[in-house]
Image (cartoon, rainbow, N blue to C red):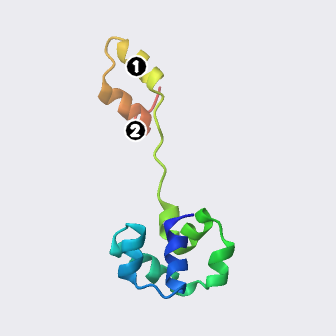
Amino acid sequence: MSNEKQILQLHSQGYSQRRIAETLHIPRNTVAKVFKAADQLSLAAVSSMDDESLHLALFPEKAALPVQEIPDYVYVHKELLKSGVTLKLLSQLYSGSLVKT
């Protein structure tokens, strides 16, 4: 069970923010953020959601974060072994700023 769901369940049982933070061993700021984000959600909706969908419902702005592409390290290593190829040149190739002719 995620921290968000535990926080909201303890809140529905009448626990204070401070007591929830102490019980779950998490910062009070985290509890406050979940309380603030959960103002628009009902307890019935929360109990029917899985952890991931609850997190996205509480914090939709975090879903829009870009995903960083992981380079092909085997290819990079082989290219760096060639003469005249530098790490700067390869980073420019990966970012798409160099046009192949």
For marks 1 and 2, give the CA distance: 20 Å
Can you tell which quarter of the image residue 48 is in?
bottom right
Q: Which mark is residue 97?
A: 2
Q: Please, what is the three-letter code of the amino acid marked with disc 1? A: His
Q: Quadrant of the N terminus?
A: bottom right
Q: Please, what is the three-letter code of the amino acid marked with disc 2? A: Ser
Q: Nearer the viewer, residue 99 or 54?
A: 54
Q: Residue at x 49, y 88 (%)?
A: 14
Q: Which mark is residue 63?
A: none
Q: Nearer the viewer, residue 37 or 61?
A: 37
The residue lying furthest to the right in this view is: 48
Q: Residue at x 47, y 59 (%)?
A: 65
Q: Which mark is residue 77?
A: 1
Q: Please give left or right for residue 47 compared with residue 75 in the image.
A: right
Q: Residue at x 55, y 72 (%)?
A: 5
Mark 1 or mark 2: whose residue is earlier in sequence = 1
Secondary structure under badge 1?
helix
Image height of 60 relative to 17, above or below: above
Q: Nearer the viewer, residue 58 or 35?
A: 35
Q: Residue at x 52, y 72 (%)?
A: 6
Image height of 38 relative to 94, above or below: below
Q: Please give left or right for residue 69 compared with residue 29 in the image.
A: right
Image height of 74 relative to 99, above or below: above
Residue 98: percent from left, percent from top: 40, 33
Can you tell which quarter of the image residue 31 is in?
bottom left
Residue 55: percent from left, percent from top: 54, 67
Question: What crowding class fits label 2: few (fewer than 14 Cα within 10 Å), some (14-19), or many (20 or more)?
Answer: few
